[in-house]
Amino acid sequence: MATFSVSHPHLLEAKHPTLRVFVTRDQIDDLGSGTVAFAQQLLDDLDLATSARTCVVTPFRSQYFSGFPDDPNWQDAWPIAWQVDIGLTTAPRIPRYDDAEIETSATDDSFRRSQHYLRASAFRCVVIGDFRRKPQLERAEAQLRKLDWKALAGASTVEAPVLRRGTWMGRGPQLQVDLGVFPASFYEAGATYAKKHVEALRAAGACVNVEDIEDWVD
């Protein structure tokens, strides 16, 4: 049984080998703080020849992982996902995957019902765009850095967006825009500020939904 889906393994620039992946719901959504055993199962299902030392889990919401990005139900339009940073014994070679997401049977024995994401009153918002080539990403990154994010936010008080680079399924560059933490009311009201960043990425040539990159890996 597939418990979760895992995608976009990317080695971070860190003192010790560290792999970042994204995890999304499949049959269950019981993910807490994570365990080394959970992280190891992710590595095994990704066919990465290395061992997990540590596991750090960060929940967020992103329209990128939605099968219904225009759904009026904000929890469907902006579903939960988890960033999982895995400390490794050695840095593996990341292959080119033939799927946009990989099913995993990993389970998190650390999970407690009190940790369920539905109990949270605020959620980090991350906008993601995939590119075919690095120059496209670099142009998009430059355009986003020029955006007047305070004007885009209107009357809302927001943090400066944090731009990070990643890799989508071992095939091409990815840009992740961390917009900060927002209450549920932000998403219920339509998450307009976040959608403006999604549109900026799309205008720059990015694929802004994981289901759409299925056409790129075929």
Image (cartoon, helix red, strand yellow):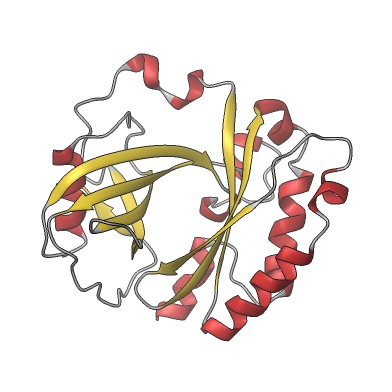
Q: Residue 121: x percent and y percent?
A: 59, 21
Would you say 39 lies left or right of 197 here? left
**The image quarter in which residue 207 lies:** bottom right
Above or below, comparing residue 114 to residue 37 in the picture: above
Q: Quadrant of the C terminus?
A: bottom left
Residue 82 at x, y percent in the picture? 41, 42
For image coordinates 27% across by 54% down, the residue present is 103
Q: Residue at x 34, y 16 (%)?
A: 113
In this rendering, the count of numbered labels is: 0
Q: Nearer the viewer, residue 93 or 132?
A: 93
Vertical placement of 175 versus 28: above or below?
Answer: below
* Nearer to us in this view, 38 or 139: 139
Q: Is residue 33 above or below residue 66?
A: above
Q: Is residue 18 above or below residue 183?
A: below
The residue positioned 49% from the left and 62% from the top of the image is 210
Q: Residue furthest top?
A: 114
The quarter holding residue 136 reads bottom right
Residue 102 in the image: x percent, y percent?
29, 59
Which of the pair 84/148 is nearer the observer?
148
Query: Which quarter of the rendered picture does the N terminus lie within?
Result: top left
Q: Within the image, what quadrant is residue 97 found in?
A: bottom left
- Extreme residue toward the front, this view: 15
User: Left or right: where does residue 97 sit relative to residue 168?
Assistant: left
Answer with left or right where residue 49 lies relative to residue 207.
Answer: left
User: x, y (%) of residue 112?
Assistant: 30, 18
